[in-house]
Image (cartoon, rainbow, N blue to C red):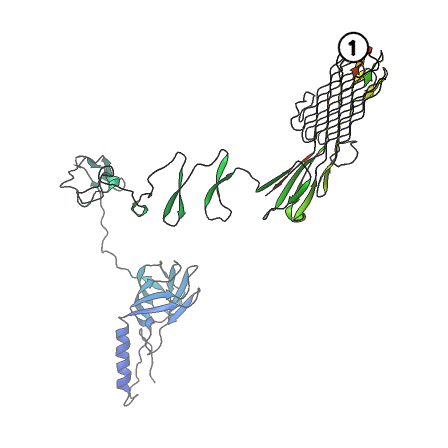
Amino acid sequence: MATYINNLRLKEITTGDEDGTWGTSTNTNLELITDGFSFGTKEIAADANETFTMPDATADATRSLYLKFTSAVDLTATREITLGPNTVSKTWIIENATSGGQTITIKQGSGATVDVANGYKVMVVTDGAGAGAAVLNANPTAATNGTVTSVSGTGTVQGLTLSGTVTTAGSLTLGGSLSDVDLTSQITGTLPIANGGTGSTSTTFANLTTNVTGTLPIANGGTNLTTYTTGDIIYASATNTLSKLTLGSADQVLKVNSGGTQVEWGVATGFSDVQEFTSSGTWTKPAGATFVMVEIYGGGGGGGGGAHLVSSDSASGGGGGGGGSYYTAVFLASDLGATESVVIGAGGSGGAGANGSSESNGGNGGNGGSTTFATITAGGGNGGGGAFVGVVASTGGGNGGNPLGASSSGWGGFGGGAAANLPNPGGPSAWGGGAGGSSDYYRQGGYGGTSLSGGAGGGGGGGAYSASSTSAGGAGGSPGQLSGGGGTQADREGGNGGASERYSDVGVAGGAGGPKGGGGGGGGTQLDRLNESPSVTVGGAGGAGGAGYCVVYSW
């Protein structure tokens, strides 16, 4: 019976066997011997260790002298390749051509192994010692190892100097600066522009000042434009087309148009839509809005009218009207309808000045109306009281409006108190309206109360004492402050109170409240001119309250 106990696993025919076929077996053996000097490739099938065994009397790449290992997948760690059988003693040149950049370890039994780094080739020998077989590194080495005891370098070339000595350690140093280089004989090729050359071998150059006429096209690095105005911006209006965008207006910014296709000038605002209302109307939700912020102001209360005196009695002036309140809210646009009604609260009417042949009180000022948007309301300010004839009382100012639209208690400022001989100022407020100032019968009218957010109160009108003593009206309140001093009818300011008057037919009227809910000033009391009978004089009318307001921002 044939055996295969040899280092190439060839068939060894027993004496007397294979009569008539021994020639075929012998030819196969000769072919397998030549395979032992050939090049072969084996592939690692998975990311794991693998054994490659040389088969008996059969052609296989494992038998090759130069054996290249590849892998079907990327290896993620060092993998062992076992060459079998472990009784084969043979020389291999192993190439690690696996994917994944990992080392492969060549082994045969439990003995020594050889690592082959990725991309490297190593000659190895297996000793075929069976279970304890080892793999040895058989890379050629020199018969003896020489030693360099010293290397030194000196010299200078074109300004560069080499110096230093290397023994078992050390380094050679190249220093200095390149100099005296002959561009004719020592430089070849084209000297780039970055190195002081032209980047060209031609001696013909174009001077853009003297050798070029006309407009330089875009394709040649130009703009294809010939004139510019101060502030023009060059931009690509289409593919390979440059255009000029003229200077925008003051406070505009450069932005992308609504279609997202081009640049344009636009308003510098963080809101995409702003709608203002000074009278009742309808708000329309803009397309694409996500959030909506609303600010509303109630109408201001009217100032009370001044009294009319005939003889020696005294009277206070008209009380100032209370300011309208302020309310703000932010909605999700989806919570609002496509349209919402906006109601702007009217300013309260000023109280009428007293008129007649006998002494009489001034009329009360009207209350300001509430302003509403969707579900929110800003209440109007209360009207100021009419001037009161008598020496024991003074006229109270109107309370400021409530931002919740109901009673002003706890939100708007309180009107100046109606206490004898004391012209109280109107109370201040944060969100509600400022209160109107009061007036007594012989002192200057109290100033209007202020509001940090809502309308300010109107000042109280001037009172009068006996037949000759008059006094000034109080100042209207100022918005965003903590003391009086308004009265210029700017936004949210209270109107000034009118002074009491003796030598004219009509008393001094209170000032009107400013827009956005300012309270009207109280009218001044009028003394009968020289006690004429019947009297034709009239007390000063109270100032009208400022109308409410609404502004809606969407983005």
Q: Nearer the viewer, residue 246 or 173?
A: 246
For the C terminus, the quadrant is: top right
Image check: 243 left or right of 332? left
Image vertical order of residue 454 relative to residue 272, above or below: above
Image check: 140 left or right of 315? left
Q: How many marks?
A: 1
Percent across and percent down for residue 520 are 73, 25
Q: Nearer the viewer, residue 279 or 115?
A: 279
Answer with the quarter of the image where residue 20 lies. bottom left
Percent across and percent down for residue 396 are 80, 23
Percent across and percent down for residue 545 are 72, 28
Label 1 sits on a secondary structure element that is strand
For the N terminus, the quadrant is: bottom left
Q: Residue at x 29, y 86 (%)?
A: 15
Q: Residue at x 33, y 78 (%)?
A: 58
- Could you tell me if residue 315 is visible in this image? no
Residue found farthest to the left = 185
Image vertical order of residue 375 relative to residue 515, above or below: below
- Could you tell me if residue 222 is visible in this image? yes
Residue found farthest to the front = 534
Percent across and percent down for residue 286 are 60, 46
Image check: 188 left or right of 7? left
Callout 1 amino acid: Ser
Q: Residue at x 49, y 38 (%)?
A: 253
Residue where numbered disc 1 is placed: 469
Q: Residues within 10 Å of mark 1 (few under 14, many from 20)?
A: some
Image vertical order of residue 475 relative to residue 33, above or below: above
Answer with the quarter of the image where residue 25 lies. bottom left
